[in-house]
Amino acid sequence: MKRKNILITGASSGLGKGMAIEFAKQGCNLALCARRVENLEELKKELHEINPESKVFLRSLDVTNADQVFEVFRAFNQDFHDVNEQLDRVVVNAGMGKGSSLGKGHAKANMQTAVTNFCGAISQMEAAMEIFREQNHGHLVAISSMSAFRGYPFAMTVYAATKAGLKSLTEGLRIDVLKKPIKVSSIFPGYIQSEMTDAIGKPPPFMISLDKGSKLLVKAINKEKANAYVPFWPWHFFKLLSPFMTANMLRKF
C-alpha cells in the first residue's frame, strides 16, 4: 500500500528534515511539526522546489505538552480531510540527546531527555492511534536507536534508556493491533550525522551522512517491517552480538 500522506514530528532539522525531503521526492504530502517553526518554513520552500504539487502543512509543536500534541495531530488530520485525503503514516521522530552521567549535576538535562523521548513519544502515539483506530488503517513508525538494546554510560545513559522504553512501547502496541489493518514499525538507526551526533565531538564509529541515512530510513519505513536496522550493515549484526558484549566493551564502544 502506498502511503501518501505523512506526519513527521521533529521535522525542523536532522533526521526529520532528511526524511521529509526524501518523502517529498516520492510525491508525498507532508504534515511537519517542530518547536522551531522558522526552520519549517524554510524547509517548506525547499520541499516545494522538489515537488511543487506536494501539499505541506506546518505547525509548531512541543511534544512534552500532551494537550498540544493531540491538538496538532487532530488539526493535521483535518487538513488532510479538507483536501479529500487521509493521514496514512505518522513518524514519531522528535527527540533530544541532552544529559550526562547520573549524579554529576545534570539532573535537569537528563530529565528533559527522558520526558521528551519517552513521555513525548507516548503522547504522539496516543494521538496517532486515536486517528488510526477511528479510520481503521494507518502506519505508525517509531524512530528508536541502536542504543535501545543495551545500557550505555556517560551522556548516553538516559538517552539509551528512553530508546529501550520506546522499543518496548512500540512492540506492545504492535501486538495490541496485530489483527487490525494498522501497521506499527520500530526503526533502529545507527550513527547518522545530525545536530545530535555533531555534539558528541569525536565522530562515532560507522557514522554515515545525513543524506544517505535519510534515504535508507525512508526505504526501511516504506517496507513497513516490524523492525528495521539502518543501515543494515553493521547494525543488524551489532544487535545480534550486543547481548554478549561485556561492560568494558560497551564502555569503549
Image (cartoon, helix red, strand yellow):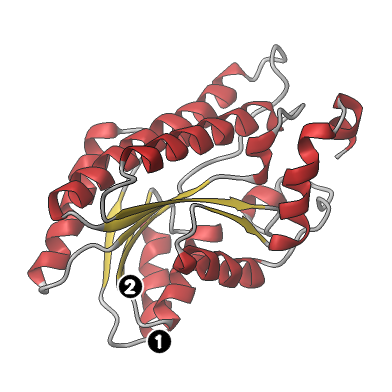
Number of marks present in the image shown: 2
Q: Nearer the viewer, residue 195 or 129?
A: 129
Amino acid carrying mark 1 in the image: Glu
- What percent of the width, then of the height, locates residue 201? 80, 47
Quadrant hosting residue 208: bottom right
- What percent of the width, then of the height, locates residue 192? 68, 58
Task: Tell me how far mark 1 sits from mark 2, CA to CA.
Answer: 26 Å
Q: Residues within 10 Å of mark 1 (few under 14, many from 20)?
A: few
Amino acid carrying mark 2 in the image: Met
- What percent of the width, then of the height, locates residue 157? 68, 27
* Residue 80 seen in this snapshot: yes
For the C terminus, the image quarter is top right
253 lies above or below 45: above
Q: Is residue 202 left or right of residue 26?
A: right
Q: Earlier in the sequence, mark 1 or mark 2?
A: 2
Q: Helix, strand, or loop for circle 2?
A: loop
Q: Give the label on residue 1, or none.
A: 2
Q: Residues within 10 Å of mark 2 (few under 14, many from 20)?
A: few
Where is mark 1, residue-wise?
49
Q: Give the label on residue 238, or none.
A: none
Residue found 28% across the figure and 62% down from its top = 58
* Residue 13 seen in this snapshot: no
Q: Is residue 244 left or right of residue 92?
A: right
Q: Is residue 244 left or right of residue 19?
A: right
- What percent of the width, then of the height, locates residue 177? 31, 43
